[in-house]
Amino acid sequence: MMKKNRKKKPFLKRKFNKGRSKSRRRNAKLKIIPLGGLNEVGKNMMVFEYGNDIIIVDMGFEFPSEDMLGIDYVIPDVNYLEKNKKRIRGVIITHGHLDHTGGIPYILPKLGFPPVFGTKLTMGFIKKKIDEFKLDKFAKLNVINPDKPLKLGAFLLNFFRVVHSIPDPIGVIIDTPAGKIVHTGDFKFDDSPAGRQKKADIHKMKALRSQNVLALFSDSTNALKKGATMSEAEVQKALEDVFKKVNGRLIISSFSSLIGRIQQIIDLAQKYNRKVFVSGKSMIDNIAIAVQLGYLHYPKGLVKDIRKYKKVKDEQTLILTTGSQGESVSALTRISNNLHKNIKIKKGDTIVLSASPIIGNEKAIASVINNLCILGATVIHHQLMDVHTSGHGHQDDLKRMINYVRPKYLVPVHGEYFMRQGHALLAQEECGIPEDRTILIQNGDVLVAQKGKLEVSKQKIETKYILIDGSGEGTIGSRVQVDREIMSLNGALIVLIFVSRKSKKLKGDPNVISRGFIYMHETEEITTEVSKAAAKAFKKIMKQNPGANRRDIKKYIKQSVDKFTNSKLERRPLIIPLIVEV
């Protein structure tokens, strides 16, 4: 599935490390720069820089907050890397979740397509996105063996398998002349991982305690949750209880990347004589990739596309779908709104949400659950039964990792500040790491490692929010976002000003169109006054400056109408003056 290199040198001898001689200066410093993943859950991306060499760990995106109107994703700001792209030796991806891979098709072209490295399933998911963006001719995708080292410039990389909520996740051991760094990626400890996932490389983690690890960069998502993360074996039991008790149709919604969970569900469907019908593009795509790469197994004919759903007895039907987060266009949301082409909810249906809410999605999920219940379904979620467990370690897991590695410094990553602060306190109080060796940093901070010490430098890299929607790329302060915010709060006014092509004088009163600004019973009175204000402003600027261009005229009219609406109604709509020559 990956690109085949024609007659290339053995994998580890490929020359991705130009400029390495400059990187071996004895007094060179190791710089570590998080461009994302701190003060948020998502858009994970961290830069490691030594001398003339740079490597990157992860390249994710974040789903937008409610105030980012019309935005699809938020990606890391890579302006610093664009200026230094010739020094980038490679990108290492720890696992296949979008908060670690989603930024790749947007960012790789900006950086000149440096080589990307990851495990087989991870690279399978990435290749799918690369193909969708028509970047397959440029991207250099490389599958790594977690048991073999990788040399990139001044960096010698080794890997250790961890357990997460997706197969093939890894942690990264980064050997540099300035010290050894361990980056956990996302992890938990589970002796019974879902599906046929491999167990964690505990022996590699334990071996690190004697290797003088300078710093451990560790996942902090669940740092405030006590105990250990519940095992997937418990989820298996809960799901089997559902299969035993439900006599009608069973609909299970989960993340499409939870390949282990999907394997559990398919195995149970086979055991309890249910045909599996799959709905949702990402679910269909990810199952196909996982099957092709050998991460998902089931008998031929057991799993089918929902479009092939025919009359099957309710007690023999299982529908596997996306939409556990209440996404507006997801299959489950369409089902809940009675808009799905193939599935109509009826009394006796049971829906299982085998996922926990991502922060910010609670309202959307509640709305979907309400709608499903109104239609007659019974809904089971993680608050009622143990039908989901996190892929991130709770406090006992985090302590276990620290005690295995025994680093000199701990740098909590992946999570909001309060989560990472909780991780730091845990390390101080229960793992014996001194307060001055638990370092809390922000996106754009620059950590410097030299002579066995790690400290935050005075240098700061700018990290703006880079916003992606169907129209392109922008920032929080962009005109588009400002206009959207104004419209969401106060609506819009379009002012059409008709001007004689010959005399440049007004032809009649300006026409005012209002949307979301005032209620109908006030419209005529207010728009008439706005029209008068716009006409007065046009006449005034043309008298004061007869040679004014269109841009200056519209700007003056906009300021005048804005002043009027603010003083009259204490509201500031988006004002769009348009000059039409007649």
Image (tube, rainbow, N blue to C red):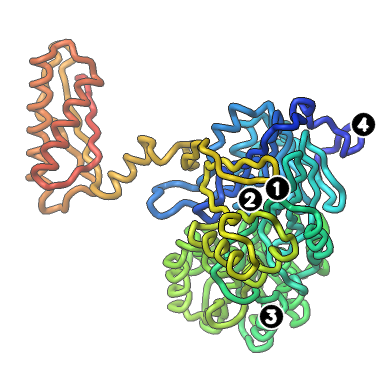
Q: Nearer the viewer, residue 323 or 113?
A: 113
Q: Earlier in the sequence, mark 2 or mark 1?
A: 1
501 w.r.t. 241: above or below = above
113 w.r.t. 233: above or below = above
Q: CA distance from mark 3 to mark 1?
A: 29 Å
Q: Under tag 2, what secondary structure?
A: helix
In this figure, which residue is indicated by the disc labeled 1? 93
| Spot occupied by residue 379 in the image (x, y as percentages of width and height) | 52, 79
Q: Earlier in the sequence, mark 3 or mark 1?
A: 1
Q: Under tag 4, what secondary structure?
A: loop
| Spot occupied by residue 122 in the image (x, y as percentages of width and height) | 73, 51
Q: CA distance from mark 2 to mark 3?
A: 27 Å
Q: Amino acid at mark 2?
A: His
- Could you classify mark 1 by the number of other residues whose Cα lies within 10 Å: few (under 14), some (14-19), or many (20 or more)? many
**Viewed as shown, does residue 80 lie left or right of 151?**
left
In this figure, which residue is indicated by the disc labeled 2? 100
Q: Quadrant of residue 514?
A: top left
Q: Amino acid at mark 3?
A: Glu
Label pair 1/4, CB-CB below 8 angstroms? no
In this figure, which residue is indicated by the disc labeled 3? 234
| Spot occupied by residue 414 in the image (x, y as percentages of width and height) | 58, 55
Q: Earlier in the sequence, mark 4 or mark 3?
A: 4
Q: Nearer the viewer, residue 418 or 306?
A: 418
Q: Under tag 1, what secondary structure?
A: loop
In this figure, which residue is indicated by the disc labeled 4? 7
Label pair 2/1, CB-CB below 8 angstroms? yes
Q: Nearer the viewer, residue 243 or 498?
A: 243
Q: Under tag 3, what secondary structure?
A: helix
